[in-house]
Amino acid sequence: MSKLTLSRVEHSQIQGKYHTIFQTIDWMRFVSQTQNAEPVVALVRDGECQVGVFYGLIIKKYGLRILGSPFPGWSTSYMGFCLEQSVSRVEVLLALKKFAFSVLKCIHIEIMDRHLKESDLKKARFKYKQQTGFEVDLTKSEEAIFAATTSACRRCIRKAARNGVRIEIADDLSFVDDYYSQLEEVFAKQNLVPTYPIERVRSLIECLLPTGNLLLLRARDKEGDCIATGIFPALNDTMYFWGGGSWRRYQILRPNEAMQWFAMLYWKERGVSRYDMGGGGDYKRKYGGVAIAVPWGRKSKYLVFAYLRNIGMYLFIIKQRISGWRKQR
């Protein structure tokens, strides 16, 4: 194999059926708007032969350039590479490091790629942490998927139907207010505030809803009141859970379980074969998925920035808790 190189191109030049939703023009436009970030798309070449594509965005912190693919707090998941199977992930990580530090003049890289392994990041001398979650196999029959959920989850889905809970698809921007007010109550239960502002939800819907790759759901009770909401993007073979909210006083009607079940069937009927529920949340286990773990890698040009990055993450958590305490007061 020749030495791998990366060279920047326009996103509009790239076409491919194996991209994730997070590697599309519309999703990167959403992140660019909400993070004031500069999109970066680069061809991966083995000599003169193109063997893949890299996706990321650059943000500036205190005048320093950081390449995220993605970066924590962006409300997005796997970006990274779209590569031919024969390409060494270790070699492409080394090429990315050189590209980021020398060509893009960045001082820090973060990357989460569904196909990267711990061993790849170790060999390339990237630090990493595991992003855990759950994934549901949607290639099975509807009956088999339902049977794979826990008995408690099945009872909740049936209970929602008996209680007259109705799931509907939303296509209006008033959904933003419904969703965010319910999200605030979800966080308030833990004396916290949401990790992102309402403007981010509005930007997501404006950028993605016209593409047909974003499912917005409302759950209504038998009186017609909106009691829960959910956001489910999807592309090619994978659907994702971006976020959900609900009113605490209506949770006895079990709208959340009914909404998740509706979303799975909706995307399954449209050819999606797996449901990646995103990181964290042990409550997701009840939907019958298997546990997955994807390493989130990072590399700093200067050692001091690695420490500053960790301090920044801790300060964000502290700020969120203080904001939640103030709101409760």
Image (spheres, helix red, strand yellow):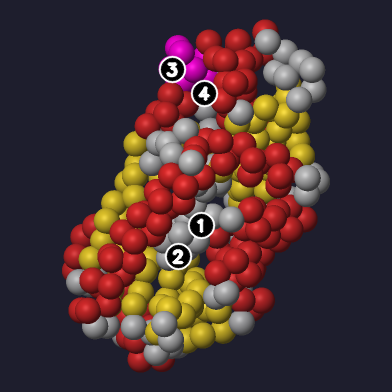
Q: Residue at x 49, y 17 (%)?
A: 153
Q: Residue at x 49, y 40 (%)?
A: 328
Q: Main secondary structure of the magenta part?
A: helix
Q: Residue at x 57, y 25 (%)?
A: 248
Residue 70 image label: 2
Q: Please tell me whether residue 183 is drawn above or below residue 27 in the rendered image.
A: above
Residue at label 1? 76
Return the disc, 2 or 3, that comes first in the chain's sequence: 2
Residue 145 image label: 4
Q: What stretch of residues is rendered in magenta?
A: 142-154
Residue 186 image label: none
Return the disc, 4 or 2, that comes first in the chain's sequence: 2
View extreme (top): residue: 162
Residue 150 image label: 3
Along the line of sight, which residue is nearer the eye, 260 or 250? 250
Residue 152 within the segment the image draws in magenta: yes
Q: CA distance from mark 4 to mark 3?
A: 10 Å
Can residue 29 be seen by looking at this rendering? yes
Mark 4, secondary structure of its residue: helix
Q: Amino acid at mark 3?
A: Thr
User: Dots 2 and 1: beta carbons under 8 Å?
Assistant: yes
Return the disc, 4 or 3, that comes first in the chain's sequence: 4
Q: CA distance from mark 4 to mark 1?
A: 26 Å
Mark 2, secondary structure of its residue: loop
